[in-house]
Amino acid sequence: MNFLQIDTIEGRIEQMKSLSKKFLTRAHQVDVEGSFPYENIEDLKKTGYTSLTIPVAYGGKEISLYELIRLQETIAEGDGATALAIGWHMGIMMNLHEKRAWDESILKLLCEKVNNGALVNSAQTEPKTGSPTRGGRPETHAVKKDQGWLITGRKTFTTMAPVLDYFIVNATVEETNEIANFLIPKHTLGVRIEETWDSIALRGTGSHDLLLEEVYVPEEYLVEVLNSKGRKASGWLLHIPACYLGIAKAAQRFAIQFAKDYSPNSISGTIIDLPNVRQKLGEIELKIMQAESFLYSAAKQWDSASENEREQMISRLGAVKLTVTNAAITIVDLAMRIVGAKSLSLQNPLQRYYRDVRAGLHNPPMDDMIIELLAKESISNCNKN
């Protein structure tokens, strides 16, 4: 069944549950090898999933943010690396339509390519700038050349690099010293992927380095000059906490099944009836309920908000990311305490979940920046009153 042929969110979630079960069967091998989940990405492309956030006018379904995070969460229950990887593509396509910052002809071209299976991600991080959310200027530079641009630089953490067809790269324009985004097709001369991804978390994301060696792109591929006044609210980034909540739910499911099955000879029955185990399971469920409530309500608020109202949601979106990601870490920890030493076996998925959710601390925005933003907002609100 193709996602584009299903008309309800419930139907698409059910379809994704079926795919997610397949992803779960492949997750261990990809993790152990540190390889890339090519089959999972191909399944998502074949079923039309990668076109869901494209505008209706260009052949997509233009799904809501709420639906996107529910689908992403379901993918992550099967494989977190696949969810985070494809989440960038899905969110970026949603964001391009919402912000309408690109020339219509370039956006239409990209949407047509995505409808035919192309994948896109942003390449913004560099070795010396760290997270782009902290304001570092890119050392990647663009020089005007004839009717186009020559771009040179290195980008790190280019998630899904093995299968990307387009890169959105930020660079400093030498003539004006402005920072701009450029759209770069994979097969452009001078584009190279260096396989540097050796993280112990989310090993299957293929987040390698992107090398750009005097890459020439046409003039119109400078798609956006970035605003120096700071970042705008970006609801699509909720795909990040949705991924970690999905991983946490997978850990919960495993812990419950283990507790129902495990029966040491020191007790009668299984450990599911032990008070200390039930205490931890209750704590896990509470954390999940809290995370779901915060995440889902923020997504629905975004979907119904005006453009001006969305700009007021920056701190709320950050708070959701912080809360859900840290809840996911706690949930996996509790699940491992239920399962015990067996959770540290390489054959046990909990040790993979443990490593994967930890990566959420390093996805933007960072916890310290969120707390500072919340502090400023609370002081400002107090002064108004």
Image (cartoon, rainbow, N blue to C red):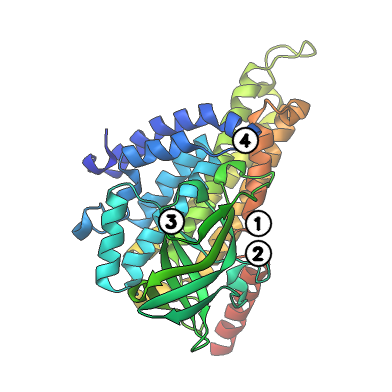
* Residue located 46% across and 47% down the image: 163
Q: Residue 384 vs residue 17: left or right?
A: right
Image coords of residue 304 (percent x, y): 32, 65
What residue is disc 3 on? 186
Q: Where 63 falls versus 212 (above or below)?
A: above
Residue at label 2?
367
- Quadrant of the rendered image containing residue 144: bottom left
Q: Are marks 2 and 1 in contact (CB under 8 Å)?
A: yes
Instruction: Report the mark closest to the observer, 4 or 2.
Output: 4
Instruction: Measure how far apart labels 4 and 2 are at the Cα level.
Output: 27 Å
The spot of residue 337 in percent (x, y) is: 74, 34
Residue at the (59%, 23%) spot, across then down: 257
Mark carried by residue 247: none
| Inter-mark Cα distance, 1 to 3 | 30 Å
The crowd level at tag 2 (other Cα within 10 Å; few <14, some 14-19, many 20+) is some
Which residue does the numbered mark 4 point to in the structure image? 31
| Of the pair 200 and 146, the residue shown nearer to us | 146
Callout 1: SS: helix
Q: Position of residue 36 (x, y in %)?
A: 54, 39
Residue where numbered disc 1 is placed: 361
Q: CB under 8 Å between callouts 1 and 4?
A: no
Depth check, mark 3 against mark 4: the one in front is: 3
Residue visible at 67% across and 22% down in the picture: 273
Mark 3, secondary structure of its residue: loop
Measured in 3D between alpha carbons, the distance from the residue under mark 3 to the one under mark 4, in whole angstroms, is: 26 Å
